Image (cartoon, grey):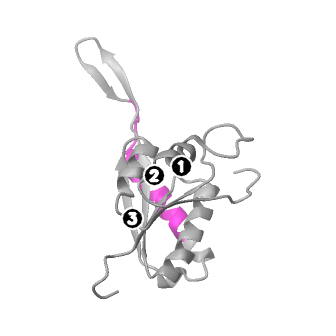
Amino acid sequence: MGDQAERRIVVGVEGSGYAREALIWAIEEAHHREAVVEVVTCFSPTYVPAAPDLGYVPLDSFDLATEVEKMQGEVIEAALAAAEFGDEVEIRRRLKKGRPADTLMAAAAGATMLVVGNRGRGGFAGLRLGSVSQAIAHHSPCPLVIVRSGLETD
């Protein structure tokens, strides 16, 4: 790449087949653009009120970051195995606490592009576009690709 600024494709991954398909697309695109792929997975711990004087405490009884990191790794490995140029593209992994749309847009500042699947794990099965994809479509800080995978169920 020489004197050029680093090309970076940010991909939002949350464990669904839609995210895996988006990552496969991003890996192929990164090969053609000589870019790195930055896989960003967002998570939010659940807090509940403990007592009036104690405030809120985490509800999650396991190490959430470790579980999210494991899930992210599984999606990345599956995508690399399925992508034609998986062994030729640098992958960077990031776990970020926060709301998915806001966190992904912050991570994508200055990126070549942001890539997400058309849907995620939540919501209703008949939706064509998930809430995160829709929010990003309106406010992305860089070019956005929403990969429509055609998955019937996940």
Whether pointer 1 and pointer 2 mark residues with C-beta atoms closer than 8 Å, the reply is yes
Q: Is residue 47 magenta?
A: no
- Disc sitting over residue 88 in the figure: none
* Dot 3 and dot 1 residues touching (CB under 8 Å): no
Residue type at numbered disc 3: Ala
Within-10-Å neighbours for mark 1: few <14, some 14–19, many 20+: some
Within-10-Å neighbours for mark 2: few <14, some 14–19, many 20+: some
Task: Tell me the quadrant of the picture where the N terminus can be found.
Answer: bottom left
| Tag shown at residue 140 | 2
Distance of mark 2 from mark 3, alpha carbons? 10 Å
Count of all numbered marks drawn on residues in the image: 3
Residue at 30% from the left image edge and 23% from the top image edge: 56
Q: Which residue lies under the disc numbered 1?
A: 137
Q: Mark 3 falls on what kind of element? A: loop
Residue picked out by circle 3 = 111
Query: Mark 3 packing: few (<14 Cα in 10 Å), some, or many (20+)?
Result: some
Residue displayed at 42% across by 78% down: 90
> Residue 18 in the image: x percent, y percent?
63, 56
Give above or below for 44 relative to 13. above
